Image (tube, rainbow, N blue to C red):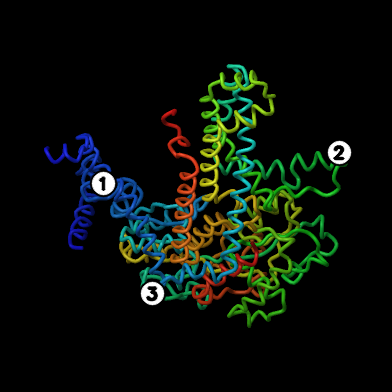
């Protein structure tokens, strides 16, 4: 362990010398090699992160550009610390493996708030420092010990106006009613949102939704199974709708707008009874840039400016209540927390999901396949 | 050196030994770790393996995997055999063209192929539109987003892997044997079934093993073309590792997969010498 610590410090000093121009690249890489780090890890993470950078671990696609301009630029301007990205997607299993292996290469993960519950309990995360991060800049109940909601995303649905033009569906009960609304549907393949939708459709009152009644939900989901296909990525959900494979599709709310545009308005987004999921920012234990820098990064992301910028760029809704009424008028229909939608959406319980995700996902997969 | 000579070990081995040890360590270490995880997570014992007998959904998933892999293997080998046979009997220039086209498919990513099938055979794809336009069907045919879609995508991907070993074994056949068979009075069909086919058996077995083992690890294609309803073991393992964090179950299935493949190789090695299957020396 001491050797490891020594090597880490040597590398850190080397990285700073490299950055300040006191050491050439080759010597730096040789140093890294001597310290026993594979070159990929060196280039992608550890040393780079040590060289005054916060590495954000997100899902790639647009988010690298959007997080860079919305959070990275103001953060660097305020602190002088650079921002880098790992776009491989911070799934729970990957975060756990990274922390267990002792080679942590990311500082802030763009995860789900339920990841903060699951991984916090097992000691894989740094606690949030609420002297830097502001607990009042998020929705009530979404400032947890090991993670905080910085954005909200939602599970809503779109429908084909040419199929249901005269009598459009407007609730999950309609979505799950294949007699009154015949046609193929799509649901999310990893259970989030789909289980809640099935229960609301089955008549569970929204304030009694959690804890989720899994057997009841599975029965409802199995009932429309023959008419349902399942997507596992946002682009897949998009193509199912745009290619006309489904007449009604559960989608991530932030994708709904581009689906309306790409089909020239043939498909329409329904935000009634949408499920608001908190996107949690979480910090792996032992992150290379240090806990404080990670917290400052999260605090920057909470500010109104970055919150609105993320919404404009990615369609993810602000979680900071100060930003709710600053969403432009024309965009309000697409924001979860805007005045027109906030009373009709249903807020997710990250604690239930954090404690039950294994059982829920496996049961759901067994039901649909 | 005296001892060395007595061991009858070529000195060259000492040069290779360090690398051999590194490779063995790098390779066996993680495998043993997986084995270890499968009997220690979440708690020590054989609970993960007991689930194989107790959990009906787990068995159903494994059966789906086996069924799809077997059908894929049979279809790929039959189609691959036909293609290899056609190549053997094509003229030199044509054969070169066919081989180039076959090899080009290795450069096309599996995702691209998967989405191409989705476009081509989807509900609003050109095939369905043509069928409906011609009045042959009134509803779009469901080629995709089900098990049929998975099979189409997988067989398409696997055919080149079946063609190459079969082609190699066809090229090894001494044509005089065929001529002798015809000369002794056998017809074309009889010559094929009794001479040609048995002589290409090592290629068929090699192709089948290759296709079957690659199919077991298939992941992207079943997930997309199956419309999310076809769950195979590779994807199931990844879900247990990444999403549900049931690493014990994942490790157990990985061990099962590895054991299954090794057992398959062992059985085949009893039936047919593996050195023959994997090329190398022509006997």
Chain letter for the residue marked with disc 3 in the picture: A
| Count of numbered badges drawn on the protein | 3
Pointer 2 and pointer 1 on the same chain: yes
Q: CA distance from mark 2 to mark 3?
A: 67 Å
Chain letter for the residue marked with disc 2 in the picture: B
Split into 4 quadrants, where in the image is the C terminus of chain B?
top left
Marks 2 and 1: which is nearer the front?
1
Pointer 2 and pointer 3 on the same chain: no
Q: CA distance from mark 2 to mark 1?
A: 65 Å
Does the image show residue B255? yes
Q: Residue furthest left?
A: B2
Taking A122 as reference, is A225 left or right? right
Residue under circle 2?
A: B134
Does the image show residue B108? no
Q: Residue A125: image x %, image y %? A: 38, 69
Residue under circle 3?
A: A130
Examine the rendered structure and indicate whether residue A160 appears above or below residue B81.
below
The quadrant where residue A81 appears: bottom left
**Residue at left 82%, top 67%?**
A179
Q: Secondary structure at mark 2?
A: loop
Residue under circle 1?
A: B21
Q: Secondary structure at mark 3?
A: loop
Taking B233 as reference, is A168 left or right? right
């Amino acid at each position: 362990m001491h050797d490891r610590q020594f090597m880490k410090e040597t590398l850190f000093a080397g990285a700073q010398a490299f950055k300040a121009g006191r050491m050439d690249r080759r010597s730096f890489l040789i140093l890294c090699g001597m310290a026993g780090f594979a070159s990929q890890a060196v280039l992608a993470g550890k040393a780079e992160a040590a060289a005054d950078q916060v590495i954000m671990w997100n899902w790639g696609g647009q988010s690298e550009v959007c997080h860079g301009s919305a959070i990275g630029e103001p953060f660097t301007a305020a602190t002088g610390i650079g921002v880098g990205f790992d776009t491989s997607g911070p799934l729970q299993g990957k975060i756990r493996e990274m922390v267990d292996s002792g080679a942590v290469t990311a500082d802030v993960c763009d995860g789900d708030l339920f990841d903060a519950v699951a991984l916090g309990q097992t000691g894989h995360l740094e606690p949030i420092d609420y002297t830097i991060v502001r607990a009042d800049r998020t929705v009530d109940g979404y400032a947890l010990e090991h993670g905080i909601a910085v954005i909200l995303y939602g599970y809503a649905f779109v429908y084909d106006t040419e199929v249901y033009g005269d009598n459009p569906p407007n609730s999950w009960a309609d979505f799950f009613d294949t007699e009154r609304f015949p046609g193929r549907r799509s649901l999310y393949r990893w259970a989030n949102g789909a289980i809640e939708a099935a229960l609301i459709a089955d008549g569970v009152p929204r304030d009694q939704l959690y804890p989720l009644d899994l057997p009841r939900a599975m029965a409802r989901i199995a009932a429309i199974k023959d008419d349902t296909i399942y997507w596992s990525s946002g682009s897949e959900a998009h193509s199912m709708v745009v290619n006309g494979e489904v007449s009604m599709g559960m989608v991530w709310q932030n994708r709904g707008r581009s689906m309306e545009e790409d089909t020239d308005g043939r498909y329409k987004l329904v935000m009634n009874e949408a499920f608001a999921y908190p996107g949690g920012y979480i910090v792996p234990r032992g992150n290379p840039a240090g806990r404080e820098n990670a917290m400052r990064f999260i605090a920057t992301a909470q500010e109104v400016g970055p919150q609105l910028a993320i919404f404009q760029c990615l369609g993810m809704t602000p979680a900071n209540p100060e930003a709710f009424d600053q969403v432009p008028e024309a965009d309000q229909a697409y924001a979860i927390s805007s005045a027109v939608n906030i009373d009709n959406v249903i807020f997710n319980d990250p604690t239930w999901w954090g404690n039950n995700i294994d059982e829920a996902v496996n049961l759901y997969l067994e039901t649909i396949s | 050196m005296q001892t060395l000579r007595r061991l009858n070990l070529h000195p060259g081995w000492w040069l290779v030994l360090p690398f051999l040890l590194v490779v063995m360590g790098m390779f066996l270490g993680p495998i043993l770790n997986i084995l270890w995880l499968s009997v220690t997570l979440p708690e020590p014992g054989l609970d993960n393996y007991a689930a194989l007998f107790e959990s009906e959904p787990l068995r159903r998933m494994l059966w789906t995997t086996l069924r799809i892999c077997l059908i894929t293997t049979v279809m790929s080998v039959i189609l691959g055999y036909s293609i290899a046979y056609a190549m053997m009997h094509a003229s030199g220039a044509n054969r070169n063209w066919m081989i180039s086209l076959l090899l080009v498919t290795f450069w096309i990513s599996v995702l691209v192929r998967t989405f191409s099938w989705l476009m081509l055979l989807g509900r609003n794809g050109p095939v369905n539109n043509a069928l409906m336009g011609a009045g042959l069907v009134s509803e779009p045919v469901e080629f995709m987003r089900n098990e049929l879609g998975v099979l189409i995508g997988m067989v398409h991907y696997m055919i080149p892997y079946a063609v190459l070993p079969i082609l190699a074994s066809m090229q090894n056949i001494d044509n005089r044997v065929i001529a002798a068979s015809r000369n002794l009075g056998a017809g074309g069909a009889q010559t094929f079934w009794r001479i040609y086919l048995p002589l290409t058996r090592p290629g068929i077995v090699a192709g089948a093993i290759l296709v079957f083992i690659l199919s077991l690890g298939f992941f992207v294609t079943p997930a997309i073309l199956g419309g999310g309803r076809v769950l195979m073991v590779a994807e199931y393992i990844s879900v247990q590792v990444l999403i549900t964090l049931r690493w014990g179950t994942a490790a157990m299935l990985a061990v099962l997969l590895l054991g299954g493949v090794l057992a398959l190789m062992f059985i085949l090695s009893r039936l047919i010498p593996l050195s023959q299957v994997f090329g190398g020396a022509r006997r």
